[in-house]
Image (cartoon, rainbow, N blue to C red):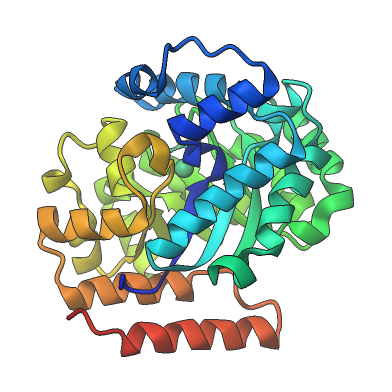
Amino acid sequence: MPIPKAELHLHIEGTLEPELAFELAARNGVELPYADTEELRKAYLFDDLQSFLDLYYGLMAVLRTEADFEDLADAYLARAAAQGVRHAEIFFDPQAHIARGVPIATVIEGLARALDRSEERHGVSTRLIMCFLRDQSAESAMETLHAARPHLDRIIGVGLDSAEVGHPPAKFKEVYEAAAALGLRLVAHAGEEGPPAYITEALDVLRVERVDHGLRCMEDPELVERLVRERVPLTLCPLSNVRLRAIDVLEEHPLARMMDAGLMCTVNSDDPAYFGGYVDDTFHAVREALGIDQERLRTLARNSFEAAFLDRDAADEALRARYLAEVEAYSFD
Ligand SMILES: Nc1ncnc2[nH]cnc12
Ligand SMILES: [Zn+2]
């Protein structure tokens, strides 16, 4: 049985396995530019974030109806449960769907159908985080926030993803202020490909509570000191960093050094259908490649629940306490 853990950095569209992509393509009469699942999988060789995003957005063409989003999320939750995930905070990219003529209500209601059954069916509690695409305009992000207003009871927070370099966090200051005023929690991708200054900006200008990736903080010792002092959780995704060439090989990933430095690290899967593993596969991979020992794996699991957005009410706090107790009681043998 894998160690219990929370997944805090997971793009639901990045869980679209080739088999489901072909099934949904057939269901919706969408032609995919690949002969079969094997040919599609062969296309998963990326030079950088942008080359991945081109494929990722293209494949979304198969997602059209509420049932498609429900099936996508349900398939993820089943896999996550098998990997020891007890709580999942799930990103989605509404602008990528609205641009294809799929209304935000279809996306959210479809995902919610799977999420509403998740505790009972898979034993996984869930939250939804709506991401803005940072390579689109600040106005488009604000329109998306407005479009989401009828569904805010379904959404715990907002995030910022897509092509990072050239799209610094400050561009989204206003929409983050508007989201905070609506009571939404705030996260943002920063320091994946972009410089450490983007991490600082995400903290100071967007006022995020967690940083997604944050990998490049290691280039700025003062920033590391600050992240340690303020105990800012980082949602790291080591397999993603290797596949998107932020790091050459997993053996060179700074996770162990980041933990040594006292950073509050969590380990997550990002886009597991594309990057060769779900979250427990990632735990195993870092254990092998970086010599992360059992007690450090337990720390990563503990951090994931401590950094989770499970503090809305007494029921949330009780859930967090239960999960943390499961982590402490877990035996690796
Ligand atoms: N790793 C990643 N970075 C930025 N945007 C993304 N969208 C999906 N995965 C992403
Ligand atoms: Zn991501």
- Residue 130 sits above or below residue 298 on the image: above
Q: Quadrant of the N terminus?
A: bottom left
Near-viewer residue (208 or 270)? 270
Residue 266 in the image: above or below residue 158: below
The residue depicted at 46 percent of the width and 50 percent of the height is 212
329 to 276, vertically: above or below: below
Q: Is residue 214 visible?
A: yes
Residue 187 drawn at (x, y percent)? 57, 53
Q: Where is residue 286 drawn, in percent x and y?
A: 19, 56
Residue drawn at (67%, 41%) of the image: 69
Q: Quadrant of residue 270?
A: top left
Query: Which residue lies most toward the right here?
Result: 150
Residue 174 sits in which quadrant?
top right
Count up the numbered dots. Answer: 0
Q: Quadrant of the C terminus?
A: bottom left
Residue 14 image position (x, y, % from top left) = 49, 38
In the rendered structure, the answer to whether residue 98 lies left or right of residue 229 reads right
Residue 167 seen by the camera: no
Residue at 72% x, 59% y is 184
Q: On the picture, is 268 further left or further right than 45?
A: right
* Residue at figure coordinates x 73%, y 54% from the top left: 113
Residue 200 located left or right of residue 237: right
Instruction: Name which quarter of the figure residue 44 lies in.
Output: top left
Q: Position of residue 39 (x, y in %)?
A: 35, 17
